[in-house]
Amino acid sequence: MNKRRRELLARTIAHIENAKSILEDAKSDIDDIKDDEECAKDGLEEHFSETDRYYTMDNNVSELEDASYSMDDVITSLDEALSNIYDVQNSLDHVE
């Protein structure tokens, strides 16, 4: 692999690692929002338990859980992509 492709490979790794970090922060925010919404829902007085407000909050918690799981999947996929790219990078170290 020539110098230009090696540099591009290193830049690609940096981009993916940066994206992963940003997505991990976003997932953490989603989890915090979900936890806050769940606490607010659980803190509603009993006479609110069958209201539209309660059901909306319950749905919000469910949607945020789904979003968090989806973020986990994306982060796992980035880890797999990085692993593959690191394998290429490591193979270059053994060729020289």
Image (tube, grey):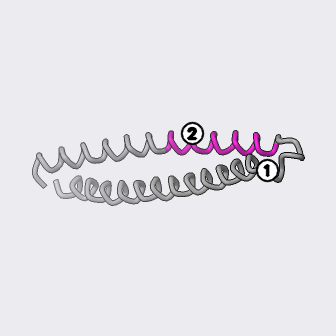
- Amino acid type at mark 1: Thr
In this figure, which residue is indicated by the disc labeled 2?
Answer: 29
Please state which of residues 15 and 83 is positioned toward the viewer in this rendering. 15
The structure residue drawn at horizontal position 34% and vertical position 47%, both measured from the top left corner, is 16
- Residue 91, horizontal then vertical, whole percent: 25, 59
N-terminal-most mark, 1 or 2: 2
Dominant secondary structure, magenta: helix
Q: Secondary structure at mark 2?
A: helix
In this figure, which residue is indicated by the disc labeled 1?
Answer: 51
Q: Which residues are magenta?
A: 24-42
- Residue 71, horizontal then vertical, whole percent: 50, 53
In this rendering, would 60 be left or right of 91? Answer: right
Residue 66, picture quadrant: bottom right
Distance of label 1 from label 2 (alpha carbons): 27 Å
Closer to viewer: mark 1 or mark 2 = 1
How packed mark 1 is, by other alpha carbons closer than 10 Å (few <14, some 14-19, many 20 or more), is: few
The structure residue drawn at horizontal position 89% and vertical position 46%, both measured from the top left corner, is 46
- Residue 34, horizontal then vertical, whole percent: 65, 45
- Amino acid type at mark 2: Asp
The structure residue drawn at horizontal position 42% and vertical position 46%, both measured from the top left corner, is 20
The quarter of the rendered structure image containing the N terminus is bottom left
